[in-house]
């Protein structure tokens, strides 16, 4: 397995078409597009990595998997009254469907849906309390106390929040958000600004590969049914309007972020994290996807 990851890292290092680093969040525009990392954490407790797998990067929308997990833990199926479970077929920051669908976002992974999930978990508390809960959860599932928010990235997102603020105000006008819009946005931006390495991310995702049980601690995070459901949402919605393409090419539940990371789950096998900052036209990591495609071709770990 280590040989395969080395081979993938080498092949991706040689690629000249690396995509475009996100610059609508100015703080992300400084990241070196030549970085590449891949990590695998298996359900048997094995760990393999290649590239700069201990370098933290902005996990961005991958964090939506963790807030969704917390929200389902807090309110169970009641969450679905304010957030849907269908792919949107539109870009991650699109507003169009909200107008025709009563301000209810299609799924928890598009920006509107993730903002609604943040509002749901705040439950009348201040952003600080919600963020403490979130970072503690992430540290717990990654078994690493050093994981932090990148406050510069969060501030950069807040300063350029017009698009997300529009989504939030629009949902609030439909009565979908209970809290002050700027407090919800501040919480959401910090959530997206969590910095993690591929090694940490693969470890954090492992409970989704092993029926909801964190490894190697053997502590249950969610029920097997909930793990399956989160995986199904990742498969159908985790790459926005390119989710079909990701399922076609990779065939694993996956969640991307505009920082260039992807968390992919191979149920019963392990969790994979890849990082390559250059994005494709849909805002998903260009080489991250290619690396996962190569991994799945060689291991046969697609769920199909
Ligand atoms: O709200 C945003 O636009 C970013 N914080 C997150 C978007 C994102 O990661 C989309 N993923 N590919």
Image: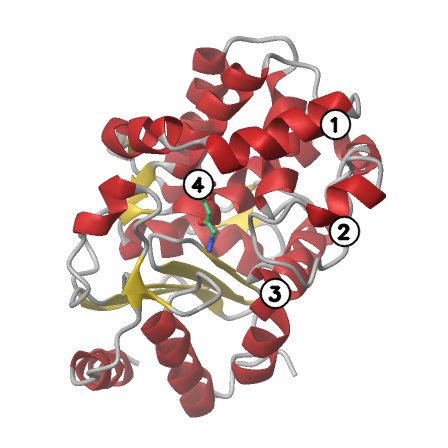
Q: Secondary structure at mark 1?
A: helix
Q: Residue at x 17, y 64 (%)?
A: 35
Q: From mark 1 to mark 4, how far is it between C-alphas?
A: 20 Å
Q: Earlier in the sequence, mark 2 or mark 1?
A: 1
- Nearest to viewer (mark 4 / mark 2): 2
Residue 106 shows in the view: no
Q: From mark 4 to mark 2, how far is it between C-alphas?
A: 24 Å
- Nearest to viewer (mark 2 / mark 1): 2
- Residue matched to label 2: 85
Which of the 4 image quadrants contains residue 140?
Answer: top left
Q: Residues within 10 Å of mark 4 (few under 14, many from 20)?
A: many
> Does ligand 1 reach within 8 Å of label 2's beta carbon?
no
Q: Quadrant of the N terminus?
A: bottom left
Quick check: 216 above or below 11?
above
Can you give x and y, in whole percent of width and height, for residue 114 in the image?
Answer: 59, 38
Q: Answer whether labels 1 and 3 touch (C-beta < 8 Å).
A: no
Q: Earlier in the sequence, mark 1 or mark 4?
A: 1
263 on left or right of 107: left
- Residue matched to label 4: 141
- Residue matched to label 3: 241
Can you give x and y, in whole percent of width and height, for residue 80 in the image?
Answer: 80, 38
- Residue matched to label 1: 75
Pick the front one: 207 or 77: 77
Q: Residues within 10 Å of mark 2 (few under 14, many from 20)?
A: some
Q: Residue at x 69, y 35 (%)?
A: 72
Q: Secondary structure at mark 3?
A: helix
Pick the front one: 170 or 141: 170
């Amino acid at each position: 397995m280590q040989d395969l990851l080395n081979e993938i890292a080498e092949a991706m290092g040689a690629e000249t078409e690396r995509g475009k680093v996100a610059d609508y969040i100015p703080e992300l525009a400084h990241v070196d597009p030549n970085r590449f990392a891949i990590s695998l954490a298996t359900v048997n407790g094995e760990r393999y990595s290649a590239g700069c797998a201990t370098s933290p990067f902005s996990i961005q929308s991958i964090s939506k998997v963790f807030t969704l997990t917390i929200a389902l833990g807090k309110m169970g199926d009641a969450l679905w009254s304010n957030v849907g479970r269908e792919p949107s077929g539109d870009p991650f920051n699109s507003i169009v469907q909200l107008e025709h669908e009563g301000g209810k976002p299609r799924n928890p992974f598009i920006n509107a849906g993730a903002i609604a999930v943040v509002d749901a978990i705040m439950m009348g508390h201040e952003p600080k309390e919600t963020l403490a809960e979130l970072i503690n959860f992430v540290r717990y599932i990654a078994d690493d106390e050093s994981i932090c928010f990148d406050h510069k990235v969060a501030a950069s997102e807040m300063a350029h929040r017009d698009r997300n603020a529009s989504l939030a105000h629009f949902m609030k006008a439909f009565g979908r958000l209970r809290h002050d819009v700027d407090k919800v946005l501040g919480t959401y931006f910090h959530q997206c600004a969590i910095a993690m390495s591929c090694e940490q991310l693969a470890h954090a995702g492992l409970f989704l590969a092993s029926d909801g049980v964190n490894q190697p601690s053997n502590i249950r995070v969610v029920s097997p049914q909930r793990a399956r459901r989160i995986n199904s949402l990742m498969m159908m919605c985790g790459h926005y309007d390119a989710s079909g393409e990701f399922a076609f090419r990779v065939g694993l539940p996956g969640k991307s972020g505009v920082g260039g990371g992807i968390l992919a789950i191979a149920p019963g096998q392990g969790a994979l994290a890849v990082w390559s900052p250059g994005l494709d036209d849909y805002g998903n990591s260009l080489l991250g996807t290619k690396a996962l495609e190569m991994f799945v071709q060689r291991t046969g770990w697609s769920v199909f």
